[in-house]
Image (cartoon, rainbow, N blue to C red):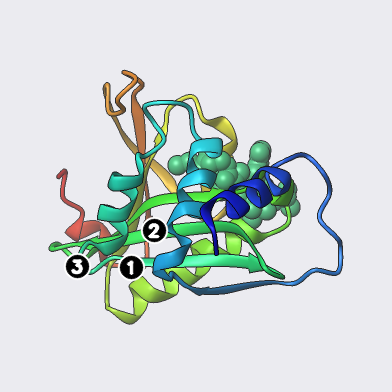
Amino acid sequence: MGKRHSEAKCRKNLGGSQPPAATQVVLRPFRAEDLERLHQIDQHCFPPRIAYSRDELAAFITHPGACTWVAQAGAEIVGFLVADRSPDRAGHVVTIDVVEAWRRRGVGTLLMKVAEQWARKQGLRLMYLETPEDNRPAQAFYRRLGYQYYRTVERYYGNGASAWVMVKWLRPDGRLEMSDG
Ligand SMILES: CC(C)(COP(=O)(O)OP(=O)(O)OC[C@H]1O[C@@H](n2cnc3c(N)ncnc32)[C@H](O)[C@@H]1OP(=O)(O)O)[C@@H](O)C(=O)NCCC(=O)NCCS
């Protein structure tokens, strides 16, 4: 698929129009040719210096132990999630992005559930993530899924914003394994 063509399509789909109600969203693994679109979605989802550069996103996706799921509606990618794991058996949501026109339709929940399933299968004890401390919608989303505020990391982002670390214990004994790293 040509880059120019793909960009034009993405802009159209990142707009505010309502998606067709009957279009089903399916999750599938990341493919190399998705990178351009995922980067474009990330640029729309996050402000400058919180959004990842294309190289950063590629590095997270290809990091050993990482896994990326893509949410697709018909031919269009409408969201994605990148997760990785740390040596202390913690799963980490690197980023979750859903295009604006597809929000509040369960796509984010689907992505989080598949990531938690992946973590559980590997015997990971918890999932954690960082979110800008002023990103109330995301915090509400994570809380709804059982994540709790854990701590604040000052000036975590490139724009100087602080992050909330939020955690969900996947096993009853997970709390014992949470490191401060
Ligand atoms: C956060 C995000 C991933 C949520 O994805 P989504 O597909 O809209 O989420 P869901 O439809 O599965 O929402 C599930 C529930 O979470 C809560 N929720 C989701 N978005 C919310 C919002 N904007 N305000 C308040 N609660 C919200 C609601 O309880 C919602 O259930 P409801 O729609 O029945 O009320 C999406 O808004 C997004 O990509 N935002 C931009 C990028 C971002 O902020 N990523 C996370 C930061 S690290």
Tell me where residue 128 appears, x and y as whole percent: 34, 52
Q: Quadrant of the C terminus?
A: top left
Q: Which residue is mark 2?
A: 82
Q: Secondary structure at mark 1?
A: loop
Q: Residue at x 36, y 21 (%)?
A: 161
Direction from residue 169 to residue 180 in the image, left or right: left
Circle 3 residue:
64
Q: Earlier in the sequence, mark 1 or mark 3?
A: 3
| Amino acid found under the numbered disc labelled 1 | Pro
Task: Work out whether residue 158 can be spotted.
Answer: yes
Please give left or right for residue 173 compared with residue 48 in the image. left
Q: Residue 56 at x, y = what percent?
A: 28, 45
**71 lies left or right of 56:** right
What is the three-letter code of the residue carrying label 2? Val
* Residue 144: x %, y % from top left: 58, 51
> What residue would you read off at disc 1?
172
Answer few, some or many: residues within 10 Å of disc 2's Cα (few below 14, many 20 plus, some between 14 and 19): many
Picture residue at 51% right of the left edge, 30% below the top: 135
Inspect the image, locate mark 3, and give the three-letter code of the amino acid beneath it. Answer: Pro
Q: Identify which residue, 79 or 123, lies in the foreground.
A: 79
**Distance between the alpha carbons at the discs numbered 3 and 2:** 12 Å
